[in-house]
Image (cartoon, rainbow, N blue to C red):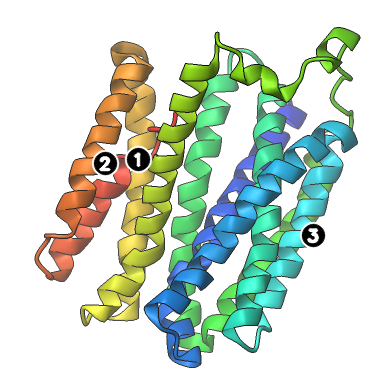
């Protein structure tokens, strides 16, 4: 691969890392938010879910926008939106306003993820494509982990708002890198025959069953993953552990995700993606159920969080 190709992949991995932090930053700061605005568990649930809802909408909107406008404008616009959203969150004065800013931020998180995945696929050489896609997958939990470590320090030093300012500054720093190392050419326009194919074609009898099954499996896995990542810090603090210990639980889940990605890559060709994916989903079910029965001992809970985090990392594949 050329130096430019390597630069493109590097920037995309860095953006994926930023997205990992931006998604979970609300979990890292959940205890501080609940204390400042006296949030009930149900109200905190709305706050935790707002960004994820925005991600879903953003991916649906910005993915096709990248096809029409080009990946580079979509990525750059998403980084601007990310920076603005994190800054708005830092300045929020109520839980309602904060939830709205998190939804806004989520729009750009989902949008940039949908586009950088395509950039990596289109930019990579045939030899390095699978490896680069794996780097993207690992970049997300690594970014969440490193961002969580920064959050621990910032929370104690400057309060929860500084954590969101940190995310805004990181997006600003990445913008000029993306400006230089995002491909300028637009994706080739589809042929006349391709342009007539409707999105509803995926519901044709030949694809319907597998497509619906894959979507349902992926939805359920991601729902479980984000539920665990979002609520583990708050749950541990309610058990009497420190905020740092609570964040450590989410961090270890992300570290487990990195380990799981690597193991999946090593075993997928040998065991088969379907067989391995099934085993991972069964393991996620068993470990998630057992997680609720782990004794409230910090070391035991953190070890269990690491184990749970390793299971869902590539189940969606």
Label 3 Cα crowd, 10 Å radius (few <14 / some 14-19 / many 20+) = some
Q: Which SS class for mark 1?
A: loop
Which one is in front in this view, the residue at disc 3 or the one at disc 1? 1
Q: Does the CB distance between marks 2 and 1 fall below 8 Å?
A: yes
Label 1 Cα crowd, 10 Å radius (few <14 / some 14-19 / many 20+) = many
- In the image, 17 versus 227, the foreground residue is 227
Closer to the N terminus: mark 2 or mark 1? 2
Disc 1 target residue: 312
Q: Which SS class for mark 3?
A: helix
Closer to the N terminus: mark 3 or mark 1? 3
Label 2 Cα crowd, 10 Å radius (few <14 / some 14-19 / many 20+) = many
- In the image, 231 versus 165, the foreground residue is 231
The residue under the point 33% across, 26% down is: 277
**Quarter residue 148 falls in:** bottom left
Indicate the quadrant containing the N terminus: top left, top right, bottom left or bottom right: top right
Marking on residue 272: none
Q: What percent of the width, then of the height, locates residue 71?
A: 81, 36
Gap in angstroms between the C-alphas marked 3 and 2: 36 Å
Q: What percent of the width, then of the height, locates residue 235?
A: 29, 72
The residue under the point 29% across, 18% down is: 275
**Residue farthest to the left, as pictured:** 295
Q: Which SS class for mark 2?
A: helix
Gap in angstroms between the C-alphas marked 3 and 1: 31 Å
Q: Does the CB distance between marks 3 and 2 fall below 8 Å?
A: no
Marking on residue 80: 3
Relative side of 192 to 305, left or right: right
Taking the image as drawn, is residue 150 in sight?
A: no
Q: What percent of the width, then of the height, locates residue 150?
A: 49, 70
Q: What percent of the width, then of the height, locates residue 209?
A: 47, 18
**Residue farthest to the front, as pictured:** 205
Disc 2 target residue: 284
- In the image, 230 versus 2, the foreground residue is 230
């Amino acid at each position: 691969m050329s130096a430019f190709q390597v630069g493109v992949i590097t920037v995309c991995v860095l953006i994926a890392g930023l997205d990992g932090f931006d998604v979970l930053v609300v979990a890292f700061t959940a205890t501080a938010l609940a204390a400042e605005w006296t949030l009930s568990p149900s109200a905190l649930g709305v706050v935790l879910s707002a960004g994820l809802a925005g991600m879903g909408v953003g991916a649906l909107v910005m993915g096709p926008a990248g096809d029409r406008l080009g990946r580079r404008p979509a990525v750059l616009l998403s980084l601007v939106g990310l920076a603005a959203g994190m800054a708005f969150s830092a300045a929020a004065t109520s839980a309602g306003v904060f939830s709205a800013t998190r939804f806004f931020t989520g729009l750009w998180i989902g949008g940039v993820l949908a586009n950088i995945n395509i950039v990596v696929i289109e930019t990579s050489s045939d030899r390095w494509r699978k490896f680069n896609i794996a780097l993207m997958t690992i970049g997300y939990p690594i970014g969440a982990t490193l961002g969580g470590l920064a959050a621990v320090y910032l929370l104690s030093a400057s309060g929860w708002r500084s954590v969101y300012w940190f995310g805004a500054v990181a997006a600003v720093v990445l913008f000029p890198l993306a400006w230089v190392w995002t491909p300028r050419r637009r994706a080739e326009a589809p042929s006349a025959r391709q342009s007539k194919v409707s999105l509803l074609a995926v519901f044709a009898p030949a694809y319907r069953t597998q497509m619906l099954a894959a979507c349902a499996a992926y939805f359920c896995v991601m729902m479980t993953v984000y539920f665990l990542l979002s609520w583990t810090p708050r749950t541990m603090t309610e058990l009497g552990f420190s905020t740092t210990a609570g964040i450590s639980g989410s961090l270890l889940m992300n570290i487990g995700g990195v380990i799981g990605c690597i193991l999946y890559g090593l075993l997928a060709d040998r065991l088969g993606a379907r067989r391995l994916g099934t085993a991972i989903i069964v393991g996620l079910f068993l470990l998630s159920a057992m997680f609720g029965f782990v004794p409230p001992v910090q070391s035991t809970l953190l070890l269990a969080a690491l184990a749970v985090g390793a299971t869902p990392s590539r189940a969606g594949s």
